[in-house]
Image (tube, helix red, strand yellow):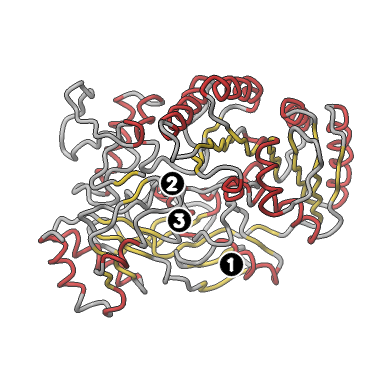
């Protein structure tokens, strides 16, 4: 423990109860990673905060003693966004879990950052509303993490990401000040600070309360599961549905390998012999849903669907979604190790990208299972490998990187909803120029001139606040991460 961390601990001992300050190595190791377990860093100190005032006191102490800090919610992130700093403080917000109010008359809910995503919908359901953003981990992920990563989910095709559902935020700035940004009214004049903060991955401060927008429960929901001989045919059906002017709540595709994993994990009973399955969910007024569903069924049949099942109630709907929602974890049934990747391309580029991914997989001898939000081109390729096999990890990392390059070449992005974090920072310069990156980091410096909030994330070579913009040269350091990749992390352990 550095002198700075010791000074922070000494200050906090008079503010927080002893059980909220974790110094024992075995306890701190519990928080060494988030959902991306390939990166592990044991924090110097873990602080389990129970109020916004405790968050502010912790951050003020860090600012005074120039100690970096990282915020963490439920720890379900998949890009290493909550990876701790070896000489820093990890601020855990999971105990801030009060759901303060649900106001149907305003279509608003006021929640603490530790409130679980699905809990908001359950609280709002009795008055006819729900919280639309629904990551696959919604049963355990927290609102604070959703805000930090601008999380999406299966229904973001129709309802958008977290950023479209947050109206105001209470936050602690990197110098420890408590402020509110945004308003509960429909619009807030001036710069969109809420939009800037949502998706900033903890680099601009820590959210301590959120006012979120609730969505009216639809009159009708209809969910269908289609089996297709090939993934190309499922993709063609998706394009045809969108081209027909239908915007489903969700359109999801799983290939045969992903279906195999889901069957072994949760026995979801998807159509036998399918090269791919397509999940389509429509919601809205009953008459509109009935009309659109007839069109969806016709288009699926035209594009080779050999079996189409329709859920008749909520229980059957849950059965259809069970395989898709469990897909990431299910892959562990068919592979000892895997990398969850997250890229996005225009819908029209899906056939070419999937074909190229198949070629890369075959050439490198690395299996790739595909699960994706087909409606908005958000790919979640699962790169399978066995770390015990010599060179397997390196090959998997290479394939993973090639997939992201493929997304960029086809006009897409290196992340659709998981964020950049520690894992993909090295790919950011492939999307943006040095000037672009400098401009982005000027915003970060405006919030955090000392560079203490979640350092080493998003940007591969963080600029020092106050320095003149410069081009990255060959002399810049590039510490090694997995498979020799350049990352800028201190104390990182990779396995």
Lateral position of residue 341 relative to residue 104, left or right:
left
The numbered dot on residue 428 is none
Q: Is mark 3 on a helix, strand or loop?
A: helix
In this rendering, the answer to whether 226 lies above or below 174 is above
Q: What residue does disc 1 label?
A: 119
Q: What residue does disc 2 label?
A: 199
From the top left corner, tell me how far across and down residue 453 is, in percent: 27, 52
Asked if the residue at tag 2 contacts the one at tag 1, i.e. Cβ–Cβ closer than 8 Å, the answer is no
- Viewer-side residue, 245 vs 274: 274
- Residue furthest to the front: 389
Lateral position of residue 409 relative to residue 448, left or right:
right
Disc 1/disc 3 C-alpha distance (Å): 14 Å
Q: Residues within 10 Å of mark 1 (few under 14, many from 20)?
A: some
Q: Which residue is drawn at 24% across and 34% down?
A: 479
Q: What residue does disc 3 label?
A: 145
Disc 3/disc 2 C-alpha distance (Å): 9 Å
Q: Is mark 1 on a helix, strand or loop?
A: helix
Asked if the residue at tag 3 contacts the one at tag 1, i.e. Cβ–Cβ closer than 8 Å, the answer is no
- Viewer-side residue, 158 vs 258: 258
From the top left corner, tell me how far across and down residue 378 is, in percent: 58, 36
Lateral position of residue 352 relative to residue 297, left or right:
left
Q: Which residue is drawn at 45% across and 28% down?
A: 395
């Amino acid at each position: 423990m550095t002198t700075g961390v010791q000074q922070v601990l000494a200050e906090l001992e008079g503010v927080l109860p002893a059980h909220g300050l974790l110094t024992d190595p075995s306890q701190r190791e519990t928080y060494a990673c988030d959902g991306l377990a390939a990166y592990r860093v044991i924090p110097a100190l873990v602080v389990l905060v129970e109020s916004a005032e405790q968050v502010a006191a912790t951050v003020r102490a860090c600012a005074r003693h120039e100690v970096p800090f990282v915020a963490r919610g439920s720890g379900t992130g998949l890009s290493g966004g909550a990876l701790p700093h070896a000489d820093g403080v990890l601020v855990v917000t999971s105990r801030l879990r009060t759901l303060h109010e649900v106001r149907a008359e305003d279509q608003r809910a006021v929640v603490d950052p530790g409130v679980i995503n699905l809990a908001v919908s359950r609280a709002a359901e009795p008055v006819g509303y729900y919280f639309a953003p629904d990551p696959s981990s919604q049963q355990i992920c927290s609102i604070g993490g959703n805000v930090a990563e601008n999380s999406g989910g299966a229904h973001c095709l129709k309802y958008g990401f977290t950023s479209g559902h947050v109206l105001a935020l209470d936050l602690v700035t990197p110098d420890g000040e408590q402020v509110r940004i945004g308003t509960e009214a429909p619009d807030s004049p001036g710069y969109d600070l809420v939009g800037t903060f949502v998706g900033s991955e903890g680099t601009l401060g820590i959210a301590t309360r959120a006012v979120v927008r609730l969505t009216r429960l639809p009159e009708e929901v209809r969910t269908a599961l289609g089996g297709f001989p090939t993934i190309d045919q499922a993709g063609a059906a998706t394009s045809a549905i969108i081209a027909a002017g239908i915007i489903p709540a969700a359109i999801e595709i799983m290939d045969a390998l992903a279906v195999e994993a889901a069957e072994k994990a949760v026995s979801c009973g998807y159509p036998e012999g399918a090269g791919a399955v397509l999940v389509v969910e429509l919601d809205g007024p009953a008459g509109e849903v009935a009309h659109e569903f007839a069109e969806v069924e016709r288009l699926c049949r035209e594009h080779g669907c050999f079996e189409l099942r329709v859920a008749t109630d909520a229980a059957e709907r849950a059965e259809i979604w069970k395989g898709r929602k469990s897909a990431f974890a299910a892959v562990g049934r068919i592979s000892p190790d895997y990398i969850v990747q997250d890229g996005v391309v225009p819908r029209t580029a899906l056939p070419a990208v999937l074909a190229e991914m198949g070629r890369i997989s075959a050439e490198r001898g690395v299996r790739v299972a595909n699960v994706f939000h087909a409606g908005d081109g958000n790919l979640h390729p699962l790169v399978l490998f066995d770390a015990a096999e010599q060179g397997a990890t390196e090959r998997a990392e290479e394939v993973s990187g090639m997939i992201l390059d493929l997304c960029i070449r086809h006009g897409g992005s290196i992340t659709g909803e998981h964020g950049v974090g520690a894992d993909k920072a090295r790919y950011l310069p492939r999307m943006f120029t040095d000037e672009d990156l400098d401009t982005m980091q000027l915003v970060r410096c405006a919030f955090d001139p000392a560079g203490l909030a979640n350092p080493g994330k998003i940007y591969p070579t963080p600029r020092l606040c106050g320095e003149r913009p410069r081009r990255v040269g060959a002399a810049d350091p590039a510490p090694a991460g997995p498979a020799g990749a350049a990352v800028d992390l201190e104390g990182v352990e990779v396995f």
